[in-house]
Amino acid sequence: MDAFYASVEQRDDPALRGKPVVVAWRGARSVVCAASYEARKFGVRSAMPAVRAERLCPQAIFVPPDFTRYKAVSRQVRDIFTRHTDLIEPLSLDEAYLDVTLTKTDSPSATATAEAIRAAIREETGLTASAGVAPNKFLAKIASDWNKPDGLFVIRPHQVMAFLAPLPVGRLPGVGKVMEAKLEALDIKTVSELRELPLTDLEMRFGRWGRRLHELSLGIDEHAVQPNQLTLQVSSEDTFEHDLTLDELESHIRRLAEKTWSAHQREAQRGRIARTIVLKLKTADFHTLTRSLTPSWRPRSATELADLACALRERVERPADSRYRLVGVGLSGFVDQDSFMAQDDLFDNMPPP
């Protein structure tokens, strides 16, 4: 989806159309959730501090996010996908991989399927989407960004090697700033230059990741579209207007525990429960700390979750006057509920040693 949250706001409020819209709460601790293309012309980007966005684009219109509406539109789009295939791997509310090797519509090609989906999204939601069509996931991802907004880009199998050759290595999935710098130290800046380095050299320098780099440079990606991926963690977090001490965090931890427990209960309805409690903290100087606990029994309510999360503060070995700008409460270590209950019963019925 193109500038998804901002586009929903512009669709629902005609006064915002054609204007630089930034979806974010105002304030020193807020970050940009989305920016319209009008705002992007000024350099505003997602995940940017809101105060920086305001400096770059003083005329920007700030709109607080409304995730209930965004999720509703996301479900509409997902319903459109399911008319064509059940092989859907969501990445977020506004992005997904689809395997359309075989479709429900007997479409003549993947390109035709992408065109049909984009047309349906425009007609039924009033929004635009961009699509990438390619032989595998990582190429399709690159292609989907190629003609934004409201675009379609196709990489056919015989075009893969030539398409990739001039791209900077930073366009390959998993190649962040650190890896990009390491490759640049080897005089490798483009994919074609990466291809020239022998596989043995890449493996010697980067281990298994070296082989992955080699495969990506050749356009190889065997990762299948994974529908219905299992949730690994549910969490809620909050950034404060003013930094707080550990002692001042309790009410916030309890509030976030309620939200996390609600998300956990939705997973429980699918037969999955979490074992591990996670407390996340970000210090005033931007260091992230996590503390976790996997008790022999699982929390059975939001209150129990909050109690355990609050207790994890005792494992934060920092001066008492340390201050924190963010706190989060999470649950991870999901397991099948039936097997967990059976294990509980087994240990409950064992004779004492």
Image: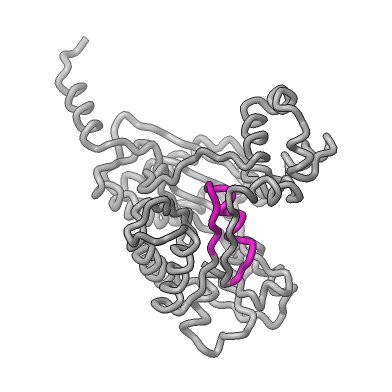
- For the residue pair 79 and 281, the one nearer the viewer reads as 79
For the point 35% across and 48% down, the residue is 228
With respect to residue 73, does 277 lie above or below?
Answer: above
What percent of the width, then of the height, locates residue 41?
71, 74
Quarter of the figure with the C terminus: top left
What percent of the width, then of the height, locates residue 239?
55, 59
Classify residue 266 as left or right of residue 37.
left
Residue 293 is drawn in which quadrant? Answer: top left
For the point 17% across and 17% down, the residue is 350
Where does the magenta region start and end? 131-149
Question: Residue farthest to the top?
Answer: 353
Whether residue 67 is visible here, answered yes or no, is no
- For the residue pair 214 and 54, the one nearer the viewer reads as 214
Classify residue 233 as left or right of residue 39.
left
For the point 69% across and 83% down, the residue is 59
Residue 209 is drawn in which quadrant? Answer: top right
Question: Residue farthest to the bottom?
Answer: 15
- For the residue pair 162 and 26, the one nearer the viewer reads as 162
Whether residue 39 is visible here, answered yes or no, is yes
What percent of the width, then of the height, locates residue 321?
62, 46
Residue 220 is drawn in which quadrant? Answer: top right
